[in-house]
Image: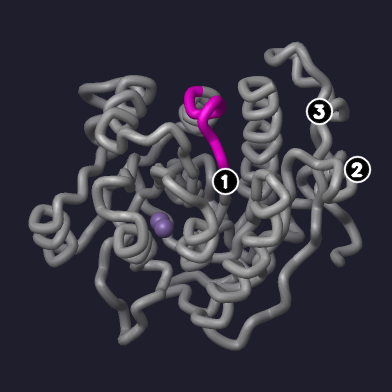
Amino acid sequence: MPESLFADANSSLEEARFAIFGVPFDKTSSFRSGSAQAPDKIREASHNFETYMFEHGEDIESIKYCDLGNLEEFEDVSSMIRGVEEFTGGIVEKGKIPIVLGGEHSLTPGVVKCLDDIGVIVLDAHLDFRDEYEDEKFSHCSTVRRISDSIGVKSVVPIGVRSFSKEEEVDAEELGLRFITSYELSEKTTIQEALEMALRWIDKDKIYLSLDMDIIDPAFAPGISNPEPFGLAPIEIKKCINYLAGRLVGFDVVEVSPPFDNGNTSALAARLVRETIMATWKAQT
Ligand code: MN
Ligand code: MN
């Protein structure tokens, strides 16, 4: 268990609606590693916020959620994904909503495997659709590809994308992956319209939301593994969470890299976790 738990996580697993856990793993990180430190940094930052969230008219202390600490430090990506799948399975079996603090994006396919009949919305600057990267099929550059393998390409929609290889573009076209770029979001459509479209494409009631923090512009979220200009403003992510809250069955926040952070990225990640808990609880109670 970490010394400090996520703020206001005062409930037991049995009583909780939401169960937080951390995955301190960054072994496939291709550029600025350090996301293994993120779960504890996000927890630390989570203590800086008011418990009363006036825009929701509620105090987060009235919501029951727990923090189960961090998983072990796995040797390689395959054992990490297996570990995440096993641990998430235990949470989902008890009817709790998993909230995962990464770590790198390679953890998401492990969580998704535990949830039945879901669609996945991935908020990410990158398409993460490489079939493999440096001989690794489960790298953080292949997250959306592996999710597509397990739930079908029609059930996953990346949003906020502004970087992919020619090869990923060709594969996306061929396999039928639909996605929405950050340029479309800035020029053509609001985030609400984009989500409405994504939900129509996915056509499932239950949604899992995976938040790669690099969707946010590096000006607002500098402490991430692969900074990519022309990103979204943080408030757009808040809107996404609120729009999807009624359908959410799980959430992860990944790719925060504390060695490159001035503290603001962890704070933003912590605040978005609090937003997810509050908005989901309100929408589903
Ligand atoms: Mn990613
Ligand atoms: Mn990314």
Mark 3 vs 2, N-terminal side: 2
Q: Which disc, if any, is residue 10?
A: 2
Q: Amino acid at mark 2?
A: Asn
Q: Could you tell whether 139 is left or right of 88 in the image?
A: left
Residue under circle 1? 251
Measuring from the top left, give residue 172's x and y in whole percent: 16, 56
**Measured Cα–Cα span from mark 3 to mark 1:** 17 Å
Q: Nearer the viewer, residue 203 or 251?
A: 203
Q: Earlier in the sequence, mark 1 or mark 2?
A: 2
Ligand 1 is found in which quarter of the picture?
A: bottom left
Question: What mark, if any, has residue 15 been given in the picture?
Answer: none
Q: Is residue 16 left or right of residue 31?
A: right
Q: CA distance from mark 3 to mark 2?
A: 11 Å
Q: Amino acid at mark 3?
A: Ile
Q: Residue at x 23, y 58 (%)?
A: 164
Q: Which quadrant of the figure has residue 149? A: bottom left
Q: CA distance from mark 1 to mark 2?
A: 19 Å
Q: Amino acid at mark 1?
A: Phe
What residue lies at 50% left-to-right and 33% top-to-bottom?
237
Q: Residue at x 34, y 67 (%)?
A: 142
